Image: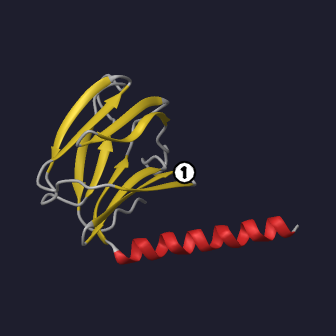
Amino acid sequence: MRKLIILFVLFIISCSSLDKKIEKNKYVFNLSIGSCFKKDKVLIKLNDTILLDNILVTSDEDSGFSNIWMTYYKANKESIMITQLGDKKQMRKTHFDLNTLLLEVYRNNQKNTFYLDLKKGNHIVIDGCDEGYKRKVYINYYNGVITYE
């Protein structure tokens, strides 16, 4: 029982330290996986850094989104990328040159390449709706909060 209490306290401390690191950093951009993915194998790279490594993605039919997103924060010399896969969060220190953002999305081994322009929007949604429904992807830019009805 004592070990369980200690583990719980350590968990709470680690969560609060993660939140403090996020609060100190400035939000830069967000990548999320949108609609029309159905058990597709997805790999995502940004400037040769692997963000998602061949995971199966299925979009929610009601919301049009998956439960996967990546958020980039930057403050002073430190930069953090947080990847959210459902209930699991992964945080890592990384740095991206914001002037040259090369996004590579592999959907079922088909490569799609985009140069991101954050002037168009800092919320980038990777959309999987295409005629073949299994290979090509598109990106859409949004500013502000994305809501779905």
Res. 14 image quadrant? bottom right
| Residue closest to the eye, 64 or 115 | 115
State which quarter of the image contains the C terminus: bottom left
Question: Does residue 94 sit above or below 45 in this rendering?
Answer: below
Q: Residues within 10 Å of mark 1 (few under 14, many from 20)?
A: few
Res. 49 image quadrant? top left
- The amino acid beneath tag 1 is Gly
Question: Does residue 124 sit above or below 112 in this rendering?
Answer: below
Q: Total label count?
A: 1
User: Residue 85: image x %, image y %?
Assistant: 50, 49
Q: Give me the residue at 30% from left, 35% from top.
A: 105
| Residue closest to the eye, 4 or 61 | 4
Q: Give me the residue at 67% from left, 69% from top.
A: 10
Q: Give me the residue at 41% from left, 40% from top.
A: 52
| Residue closest to the eye, 12 or 129 | 12
| Residue closest to the eye, 68 or 26 | 26
SS at circle 1:
loop
User: Residue 26: image x %, image y %?
Assistant: 29, 72
State which quarter of the image contains the N terminus: bottom right
According to the picture, the residue beneath numbered tag 1 turns out to be: 86
Q: Give me the residue at 76% from left, 70% from top.
A: 6
| Residue at the limit of the structure toward the right, as seen here | 1
